[in-house]
Image (spheres, coloured by chain):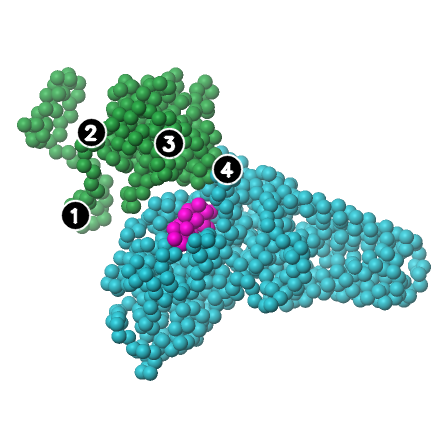
Amino acid sequence: MLETLLPILIFAALALAAIGAWRRIRLWRQGRPAEVDLLRGLAAMPRRYLVDLHHVVGRDKVMSNTHVTTAGGFVAAAVLMILVHGLGLANPVLGGLLLAASATMFVGSLFVAKRRRNPPARLSRGAWMRLPKSLMAFSLSVFLITLPTVGVLPQDAGSWVLALILSAVLVWGLGEMVFGMTWGGPMKHAFAGALHLAFHRRPERFSSMSGGKSRGEAGSTGLKALHLGDPGAKLGVETPSDFTWNQLLGFDACVQCGRCEAVCPAFAAGQPLNPKKLIQDMVVGLAGGSDAAYSGSPHPSQGLGGKSVGEPSLVRYGTPHGTIVAPDPMSGGTALVDAETLWSCTTCRACVEECPMMIEHVDAIVDMRRFLTLEHGNTPNKGAEVLDNLIATDNPGGFDPGSRLHWAADLNLPLMADVKQAEVLLWLGDGAFDMRNQRTLRALVKVLRAAEVDFAVLGNEERDSGDVARRLGDEATFQSLARRNIATLAKYRFQRIVTCDPHSFHVLGNEYGELGGPDFNANYEVRHHSTYIAELYDMGRLAFKPWKGGTVTYHDPCYLGRYNGEYEAPRRVLEALGIQVSEMARSGFRSRCCGGGGGAPITDIPGKQRIPDMRMNDVEESGAELVAVGCPQCTAMLEGVVDGPAEVRDIAELVADALVARPAGGATTATHRPLAEEVI
Amino acid sequence: MRPEQQGVEVTVLVSVGRHPVTGRARRADQDARGLELALGLERQLAGSRVSLLHAGARGEESEAALRGYLGMAAGAGMGLASLTLLEQAEGSDAIPALAEYLAGAPPQLVVTGSRAERNEGSGLLPYALAERLGWPLVNGLAAVEMIENGVATLLQALPRGQRRRLKVRLPAIVSVDGAAPAARQSAFGPARRAELEATSVDAEPDYELAEWQLAPARKRPKRLKIVKAASARDRFKAAAAKAEGRGGQLLTDVTPQQGAEAIVKLLKAEGVLR
C-alpha cells in the first residue's frame, strides 16, 4: 500500500511547494526592480552558503554543528527520498544512503530539540517551538518507511494500521519541511535564504574563489546612493513595495535567531528598536497581515506616548502598498513601525555582522529614513537643525566655515591651496570645531611632524564629509557635500588621505567612489590615523618611550572595525607604545557601539539607559584605567559619561605623549621644517 | 471649533533669506514662521487654502531658497504645490507689484515676516502694503485664535512674553517675528517637485534702494555685563526684573492734540527735534 501512497504524497507535497514558491516569488516581486545577475548569483550560491554563511554561523560551534547535521541530513534525505520512494528506485545502496541521511537528520533534530527546551530570550517561540518535533517526524518516518526497501524489514511488515500511522507522521513532516518551506512556515528560511544568498544586493560582500573580498576585509559596507536624477520619483521607502525585490527577499530569509537582537546597542539600552522584530515587521508588510503571530521580543517600550511599558499590547497591520510609518504622529493612527524605531539605530552594523542570513538591516533602516527626511521633512529632535546647518554652513554645528582652522592658528599647517601637492592629505573632519577633538588633531599633527611626513590640509576648503546627513536620510545634502568635496579634492595631488575620523574615512573611502564621474575619480586611498601611525612606526620613523601608565583597554569604533575591517593597526600602535591591551568582553568585530553613530545623538530617542554608559561599564569590567579610542564620536560619547571609570584618550594623543627623538641613524633628519614643540 | 466656520484664503509673502553666518540664500526665518502659522490654520479651519507669493528676480540661488518654503508642505495637503512668482528685474520695487496682485485677487489674510534678511530690511513692506490696500495691519503675531464671520481673533506678542488679544476685520495683513511658532523642516522631495508659477510684472525700479549703499554690517560693540549680584537670589531678581523706565509718562484718555504735544515735547527733550 505504501508503494502507491508514497509517490502520491511526495509529489503532492512538491507540487504544493511549487505553487507556494510561485506565490512567494510574486510577493517579493512587488518590490522595485534591482540589477541582479541571476545566473551568476545562482552559481555562486553554494559557495556563499558553505563559506561566507558558515563563517558567521560557525561562531557558535554547537549551533553550527547542529545545523550542518540537520540541514545536511535533510537535503540528502529529501533528494534520496524523491529517488527511492517517489520514483521507485528501490535500490539497496540508495536506500542505505537514505537511511543514513535520515538518521543523521534525526540526530541533528535531537540537538535542535535540546536547544528548544530552555531557549534564550533572543529566540522566537511560537511556530519555531514545533520545529524540532517536525524535524523528528520527517526524519523518523522517512527512516522507518525506508527499512523495508533495504530489506531489513519484510515489505509487508506490520499491519495497514501501522502504515497509515506512519503515513500520517510523514504527512506532518512533509507538510512542515516541503509545504511549509514556501508557504510561510519556519522552514521558509531555507527557501528564501538560499535565493537571498544568490540574489544578494551586495554580491561584493562575499568572498571569491581567488580568496579575499573585492572590497577590503570588511566586504561591502558603504550605503548605496539614491538616484536623485528624476524629480518625479518618490525618494526613499514609504511602503514595503518601495524596497527592491531582493531586499524583500532578504527580509523573508530571516530565521529569527535573534543574534541581531543580542548585539543591538539600541535594544540593550531599551530604545524602541529590535532589529529582529523590524525585519519581521517588514515580512508582515510584504506578505500583508498582522504581527499577532510574532513570538519573539518586541521593540522595547518605555511607556512613552501612551504605550505600555515593555510588551506592546498593540497589534500592527501591514500591506505591501501601505505606509510603513504613520505620516503624522499628531493625527493619531499607527502604522507598521514607529518612526522612533527607525531613528534609534546607530548604524553600528553589529546586527549585519552577526546575521547568519546576511540580511542588510542598516540599508533598510536608512532607506526608510530617507523617505521620512526627504519626503516628509520629519527628522526628529535636532535633526532638522543639523541638516539646515549642513546646507547653510557645510558643518553640522552651524559654525562659520571660515573658522575651521582656528584651532591650528599657531601650527602653521601647510594648505593644499598653497602647496598644491603633498604625500598625505590630512582630512580634519568636523572635529576641527570641537575643542576636545582639537586636542587629538594637534597631537596628530605633532606625530606627523615628528615622522617628517609631507602633509597638507584643505583648511577652509574642507566640508563635512556628509556622513551624518546621509545617515539621517538626507541623501540630497550628502550628495551635494560629497560632490563639492570631490571637486575640491580633484584640484590637488596627493597619494593618500589620512584622517582621525573613522566616519570621514568610511565615507571618503567607501561611499564617494560611486559619485565620481569621468572627470573626477573619487576612489581615494584613505587611512585611519592609527593605520598610518602603525606604518610610520614599522618604517622606523617614530620612536616611543616606554609606557608608564596603568592598564589600558581599546574601544573599536564601529566605522573603523566593522565598516572597514581595521582591528589590528590600533592594537599594533598600542603594543608599540609598550601597552598591553586588556580587552573588553565585547571587542573586535563584536565591539559595542558608543552610541554616537548614525545621527543617534542628534535624534536622541529615549531609552531606559544610555548606550555610552553601557560601554563605559564594559570598560570598567575590563579593569582598565584608560580607554584608548580612535574616533571623535566615541571620544565625545565616552567622555560624556558622568563619573566615568576610565580616562578617554585618542591613540594620537597617547602616541604624541610618548614621542622621543629617533635614535641616530634613522631617516634623514629634518632640515627645512622646525619640529613643533608643544605641550598637549 | 464649530462646523459653520469656513476655511480662509491665506497668502503668505515669502522672501529670499540670507544665512547670518555664510550669507547663503535660504528660506527667511520670519517668513517661514509666517508659513508655519498659515499651515497651522488648516488644523483649526478645515478647507483653508494657503498660497505663496514672492516678487523678485528668478535665479538659481533664489529659486532654491524659495523652494525651501514649498518643502514645508509635505503632508499638509493644502494644495501648496506651487508658488506664485511675480518676476521682476533685480533692484525693482516689490511693493507696487505685490499690492496690485493682492488687490486683483484679494485673500482674506496676508501673512508676512516683519523684516527681510536682504536689501534694506527696513521692515516697512507690511506697512506700505497695508497703506496701499487700505487693510488693517497687526505686527508681531503669535497666533490666530479664531476666524469667524470675517473677523479674526489674533494674539499679538508683546515684549517679555506678554500677549494682547485683538479682533480684526478681514481682509488684513499680519506680520510675524520670532514670537511665532518655529518653522517646520523643509523636505527636499516636495520642494523639488513643486512648481514656480512665474508671471512677469511691470517693474518699477526702486529709486530709494538705488541711492542706498550696502555694506556688510559691523558687529556693534556690546557693553560688558558686570555681575554685581552676590547671591543667587540677587542674580535671579536681576534677571527677572522688568526694565525700569525712568521719567516715563502714561497718558490715558487724552485728545489726539494732547498726545501729539506730549510726543513733540519728548522728541525735543531727547534732542531728536530741534
Distance from disc 1 to disc 3, alpha carbons, whole Å, reads 37 Å
Specify the amino acid type for callout 2: Glu
Do the residues indicated by labels 1 and 3 lie within the same chain of the protein? Answer: yes
Looking at the image, tell me whether mark 2 or mark 1 is earlier in sequence order. 2
Specify the amino acid type for callout 4: Gly
Question: Which residue appears at 56% of the width and 54% of the height?
Answer: A360
Q: Secondary structure at mark 2?
A: helix
Principal secondary structure, stretch drawn in magenta: helix
Q: Is residue A46 left or right of residue B60?
A: right
Q: Nearer the viewer, mark 3 or mark 4?
A: 4
**Where does the magenta region start and end?**
A467-487
Residue A243 lies in what quarter of the image?
top right
Q: Secondary structure at mark 1?
A: loop
Specify the amino acid type for callout 3: Leu
**Towards the viewer: B214 or B158:** B214
Do the residues indicated by labels 2 and 3 lie within the same chain of the protein? Answer: yes
Residue underneath mark 4: A232
Residue A173 position within the rendered picture, expressed as x and y whole percent measured from the top left: 78, 54
Assess whether residue A307 is covered by the magenta stretch.
no
Residue A487 position within the rendered picture, expressed as x and y whole percent measured from the top left: 39, 53
Which chain is depicted cyan? Answer: A
* Crowd rating for badge 3 (residues with CA inside 10 Å; few <14, some 14–19, many 20+): many
Distance from disc 2 to disc 4, alpha carbons, whole Å, reads 43 Å
Residue underneath mark 2: B208
Which chain is depicted green? Answer: B
Looking at the image, tell me whether mark 2 or mark 3 is earlier in sequence order. 3
What label sits on residue B35 in the rendered view?
3
Q: Nearer the viewer, mark 2 or mark 1?
A: 2
* Crowd rating for badge 1 (residues with CA inside 10 Å; few <14, some 14–19, many 20+): few
